[in-house]
Each structure stands twice: as structure tokens, then as C-alpha cells.
Image (spheres, grey):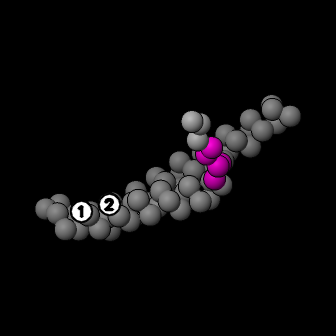
């Protein structure tokens, strides 16, 4: 049986990725080597950069598809 997967907006996916970083921050806070504030902010910046790069790629290739 085939499963239908709805496409989700990039903004939602980006927020999910940020939530995963928050969960990882909380997990590490209970461990031996917690993230510093700088490491946390770096992870958040990486998420934003990855999704901004994806948005740019989609904008450039949207014109080719038309």
C-alpha cells in the first residue's frame, strides 16, 4: 500500500530542525559535555544557512521548470 506524503513548507521544516537542535541541547545539558552558548548558536546558524541555501536553489531552478 502506497503512503501519501504531503509536501511541507520549508519554514515548517526549518522550525522542526531548530526544535531538534533544542532537543539535542537539552540532551547534552544532562551529559558530561554540554554545549556552550556559542556552540548552540552555531548549530542554529547552520540550520538557517542550510534552509536559506535551499530556498536560493529553489528560486534559481524554479525558472528552469517553467
Disc 2 is placed on an element classified as helix
Q: Residue at x 17, y 63 (%)?
A: 31
Contact flag, marks 2 and 1 (Cβ < 8 Å): yes
Q: Which of 18 and 8 is in front in this view?
A: 8
In the displayed image of the protein, which residue is found farthest to the right? 66
Q: Where is residue 5 in the image (x, y as percent from the top left)?
A: 61, 45
Q: Position of residue 42 (x, y in %)?
A: 40, 58
Q: Is residue 18 left or right of residue 22?
A: right
Q: Nearer the viewer, residue 11 or 3?
A: 3
The answer to whether 27 is drawn above or below residue 46 in the figure is below
Q: Which residue is drawn at 59% across and 60% down?
A: 12
Residue 1: which numbered mark, if any?
none
Disc 1 is placed on an element classified as helix
Q: In which quarter of the image is residue 53?
A: top right
Verify whether residue 15 appears in magenta.
Answer: no
Residue 28: which numbered mark, if any?
1
Q: Which residue is drawn at 29% across and 68% down?
A: 26
Q: Where is residue 59 in the image (x, y as percent from the top left)?
A: 74, 43
Give the CA distance from mark 2 to mark 1: 6 Å
Q: Which residues fall within the magenta stretch?
A: 4-8
Q: Is residue 62 left or right of residue 40?
A: right
Q: Where is residue 24 in the image (x, y as percent from the top left)?
A: 32, 60
> Of helix, strand and loop, which mostly describes the magenta segment?
loop
The answer to whether 27 is drawn above or below residue 51 in the figure is below
Q: Work out which quarter of the rendered image holds the N terminus and state it.
A: top right
In the displayed image of the protein, which residue is found farthest to the left? 32
Q: Name the residue under label 2.
A: 24
Amino acid at each position: 500500500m502506497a503512503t501519501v506524503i504531503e509536501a511541507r513548507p520549508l519554514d515548517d521544516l526549518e522550525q522542526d530542525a531548530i526544535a531538534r537542535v533544542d532537543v539535542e541541547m537539552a540532551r547534552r545539558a544532562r551529559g558530561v559535555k554540554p554545549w556552550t552558548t556559542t556552540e548552540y548558536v552555531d548549530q542554529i546558524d547552520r540550520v538557517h544557512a542550510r534552509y536559506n541555501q535551499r530556498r536560493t536553489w529553489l528560486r534559481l531552478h524554479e525558472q528552469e521548470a517553467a
